Amino acid sequence: MAKEKTLSGCAASALAVKMAKVDVICSYPIRPYTATMMELSKMVADGELDAEFVHGEGEHAQLSVCYGASAAGARTFTGSSGVGVTYAFETYSPISGGRLPVQMMIADRALDPPGDFGSEHTDVMSARDQGWLMGWAETPQEAFDNHLINYRIGEDKRVMLPQFVCQDGYFVSHIPNKVIVPEQAQVDEFLPPYSPGAHVLDPQKPMSHGPQIRPDQGAIMDLQRAQAFLDLPKVVREAVADFNRIFGRNYSPFVEEYMTEDADLAFFIQGGHTLTARHAVKHLREQGLKVGLVKLRFLRPFPTQEVGEILSKFKGVGVIETNTSYGGSMRGGSLLGEVRASLYDAAKRPVTTSFMAGLGGDVIPLKDFYWAAKILAQAVKAGKVEKTVYWAGLEEQAA
Amino acid sequence: MFNIPKESAVPFGCVTPAPVGEQPMMITGNWREFRPVIDNEKCNLCLNCSVFCPDACWQMNEAEDEMVWNAKYCKGCLICVNECSHDALTKAYELDFPDGVVRLEKPF
Amino acid sequence: MAFPVNTQMLPLFKKLRQMPKEEQYVPGHRTCAGCGPALQYKLVAKAAGPNTIFVGPTGCMYVANASYLCTPYAVPWIHAQITNAGAVASGIEAAYQARIRKGTWKGELPNIIAMAGDGGATDIGLQAMSGLMYRGHDVLFICYDNESYANTGIQTSPTTPYGGNTTFTPPGKMVPEGKKLFPKDPPQLVIGGHPAVKYVATASVAYPVDLMTKVRKALNHKGPTFIHIHAPCPKGWKFDESKTIEMARLAIETGMWNMYEWEDGEYRYQYRPKEFKPVSEYMKHQKRFAHLTAEHIAKMQAFIDAKAKTPGIPVKVPVPGPRE
């Protein structure tokens, strides 16, 4: 019988990883993801989880240990936040290019300078070009589920790619919420044991992993990985469908819609602040505004087609950006550019703008969503946006 | 969407087979200017040449009564000539030999 | 950390005739003619045998060996970053511990050997090396020392000798000796503060049976071990490529390189000269020292005198700081 527990995102992640019967874990402490490792170390110490718990000397080491362990045929797990994520940066490409399905939990955190423990998506989003899967959970339940789904997808022989399984620091990682914990048998049915491919270090089958290449061989290697990302959505859909069937959930693989049936306006959002956004949408609806929200579950692979199709239904889309991309084309965060690119070929395109919110770990109060909706409504009326980026709480409230 | 022609395919995850006995994709015999020449009468099979060669180009034969030189890979560093314990090895100019300077069809 | 029972024990041998015939590091690699590091790789691989996994951080023993899309390693080998050989080797070991314990891989725990250059061991790779030593993984960490960042064109590293001309320490009127800093002592870095380490040794390509014996002893130990191997570099040190072994021998005869083992807290020495030759006998053959004056060579002599007296005890002679 599946049980209902009240768990923080960190605890939910740890429990999922335990039920996934991981082989090698590499830890290093940094707020706010640390609690996940604390939970896992206790499970290992108590004999509940048979895994090697390796104390890395830093985040770069965490990923390096997992690179070696995965290459030697182990199911691996590690995690980090903030500057830890960027410290390990060198390792992301070797792991992806080596086709090693390492899983890294991200409880996101604002980057220095200066020290800031609060949530922000920029840390791991800065690695979005490195060839990993990447997606956010809105709740501890979704975090739990995403860990299992990502192992299944990442280890699929058609994919063999590492995954960033992300959740908002503190808002999701620390605030407890209801999690339906499945039976081990359900997890075993959904997630087979890791069956390493021929590219694994084994003295009984010697091979050389990662020799130097000529420049003219580089493009072909990149193309092969690009091809894997093209094949990926099919595997994602299969895995999510299977997950829903076995665990009784109802996830949409890539994009979730909420109250969008006859909406004129929509928020486009990922992660924990979606919870607040849902309430805002409900209240705005009660006041007669036809607004909905579209939640992104996978940033990589970006569901270009789905996003284009869904968002073209609306007259106005406001992208909530809890990340920064200085000097980027939209002069705000990264999501608006991706949204506009997805809409480029659509026959009908909404007006789009972005709202920088939740940066530094600040909450996004309901009133910020109301303010954003108002700006969006005005833009739809005018037929165009005044600018591509608005900073919530920092603009004059005249609008 | 992408069509990778077979001849351009590179190994999955940049993993290549381990060599067996030698690595023919990196033939180095055409590097040398001099080659070591052995006088088997003087050689006492001390194995200095074999152990000190960075390229493993001196090996004892099956019968264990003679040293065999690997012309395909020897770079002509002449460490073996320097370390031979019984003056059995001397150096000779590569071009003096009819098979001197291994020619490859294309560089590397 | 529990070790599985089934780890292999490699027999020690005393004569060249007894060394294994099989090569695990085969002909066909792009290292320089006369390359000291290539030679030590061959010897280490031969001593380790087929149940071995090598970790190859970036350096000469990666780039020169693995160009292009082909390698000379007959045993499994994986590339690591120059920063993380120790960590990658730790991960491989942890994976095999887990897999053997859980029954998903059957066999004896493979030899896991990290093959790092002096930069990958004592400079950019120091942190990962120390982490490995601290955590006690069953891994042999080898520092092949050619006394520079050779692969990138001979730049100074923490083991480049005082006075060594490299492309980052060229002599000039502001810096007549070229390199002012005295080198780190890699085995002492390990011995000093890692309680899980039971065996540390230095070795040289000049004494191959000694080298292969030390490799096997280290592999037979359960836990992390460290071997510092002197591997002369004809290109970087600027001497004739046929003299690699001579240079290695001279280093020992002059005290520039000390041969010893440290096992369970005890030092044992090998090939200690009764009388040391002056360091100038070593330095005169290598053009990387050609710019030095008698004053510089005297400084080197003083440093080596103190170091060679009792290997393993910190140098008591005050070493001049770089700004003095």
Image: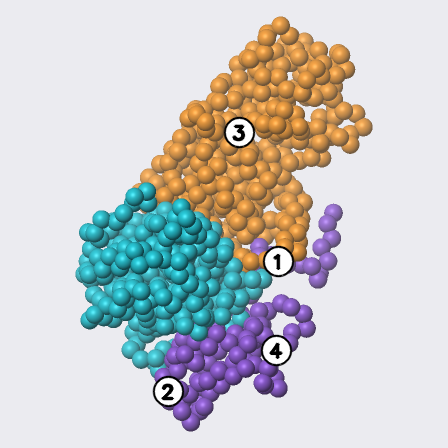
Residue A136 in view, yes or no:
yes
Query: Which mark identifies residue A121?
Result: 3
Do badges 3 and 1 share one subunit?
yes
Q: Is residue B81 above or below residue C307?
A: below
Q: Disc 4 versus disc 1: distance between alpha carbons?
A: 23 Å
- Chain C is shown in which shade? cyan
Residue displayed at 64% across by 31% down: A255
Quarter occupied by residue A277: top right
Q: Mark 1 points at which residue?
A: A214
- Determine contact: label 4, label 3, CB under 8 Å: no
Q: In this view, does C303 lie above or below A300?
A: below
Do badges 2 and 1 share one subunit?
no
Residue extending furthest top? Answer: A398
Query: Which mark identifies residue B86?
Result: 2
Identify residue type, mark 1: Arg
Q: In this view, does A117 lie above or below C236?
A: above
Camera-near label (2 vs 1) is 2
Q: How crowded is mark 4: few (under 14 residues within 10 Å), some or many (20 or more)?
A: some
Identify residue type, mark 2: His
Residue C4 in the image: x percent, y percent? 32, 59
Judged from the image, the secondary structure of the residue bearing numbered disc 4 is: loop
Q: Nearer the viewer, residue A97 or A35?
A: A97
Q: Name the residue under label 4.
A: B102
Residue A342 in the image: x percent, y percent? 71, 32
Chain letter for purple, please.
B
Q: Disc 4 versus disc 3: distance between alpha carbons?
A: 59 Å
